[in-house]
Image (cartoon, grey):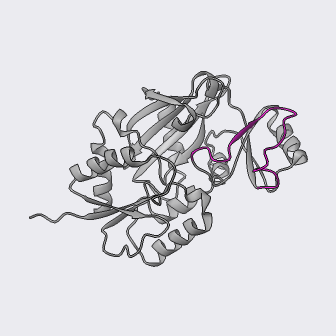
Amino acid sequence: MPFQPRVAILVPAPDYYEKWQPAFARKAVALAAAGLIVEQRVWSDPGDLSGYDLVLPLFAWGYQRDVAAWYALLDRLEAEALPVANPVPVLRWNSDKAYLAELGAAGVAVVPTVEVAMLDNAALMDARAALGVEEVVIKPAISGGADGTHRIALGATIPADALGQRRLVQPLMAGILTEGEVSLFFFAGKLSHAIVKRPASGDFRVQEQFGGRESAWDASDAAQALAAAALAVAPALPVYARVDMVGDAAGRLHIMELELIEPSLFLHHAPDKGAAFGHAVAGALVG
């Protein structure tokens, strides 16, 4: 019988509130088709991982709610020299959205962002002035699934969960309400597929739990070039990557964020249903 590598996928604790199993099943099928044996390990208490040929943090959902435990896990993976995809330096770099400033410094078009160490009315007013807008979106620098993300109109009260906290302040990008947010998916550096996600009426968040909906999208040359430029700034080429972007009032695309840790990959929209994903992960075993 041919050797089949064992892959540990890090998953949420049993009491995690979001439904992750259907997406896990799609990824597991793609990995099994590539000749890999897939097993689940809870990310916050994974136990001994030394027997695995690769560790994938693909469903480490909720890590932003226990940042200390997440960074401790990354330190441990690195200290034990465990094979991880994406590599630990990429995971650590992508954990904090401070990387957006690094992208901007490299000439990549990103959503304009002002980082505030302790958000209050004065700091918010200064951020609005720096951005030249009245309506803004605030979000934690370490976040996921739109956790702690709020749209704040001029004169509105700062939400209690954000007051006095480190926050990123961004303009409400016009494109999110008209064209939606687009996501491009790359496996081993090659474009697999793309989607457009649109928010529910009256909302600005595109996530499914807030009523967002997605459909296949034919990625433009401009979108592909922007995604490639952003990924080139990462510490290493990601095995898997989702690049989220949104247009401004003129339609010019800007990077919203890079998802290199635990992204939904929407493999049901991939023409090959995830074969390229499986091959990329299998290739990481050799590299």
Where on the picture, by quarter, is residue 165?
bottom right
Up-down relation of residue 266 to residue 74 (above or below): above
Number of on-image labels:
0
| Nearer-the-camera pick, 270 or 211 | 211
Q: Position of residue 85 (x, y in %)?
A: 40, 60
Q: Which residues are magenta?
A: 145-165
What residue is drawn where x is 64% and y is 29%? Answer: 203
Q: Quadrant of the C terminus?
A: bottom left
In this rendering, position of residue 90 left or right of residue 266: right
Where on the picture, by quarter, is residue 175?
top right
Q: Position of residue 145 (x, y in %)?
A: 57, 45
Q: Quadrant of the N terminus?
A: bottom left
Magenta region includes residue 222: no
Q: Is residue 245 visible?
A: yes
Up-down relation of residue 88 to residue 185 (above or below): below
What residue is drawn where x is 53% and y is 43%? Answer: 229
Q: Is residue 287 visible?
A: no
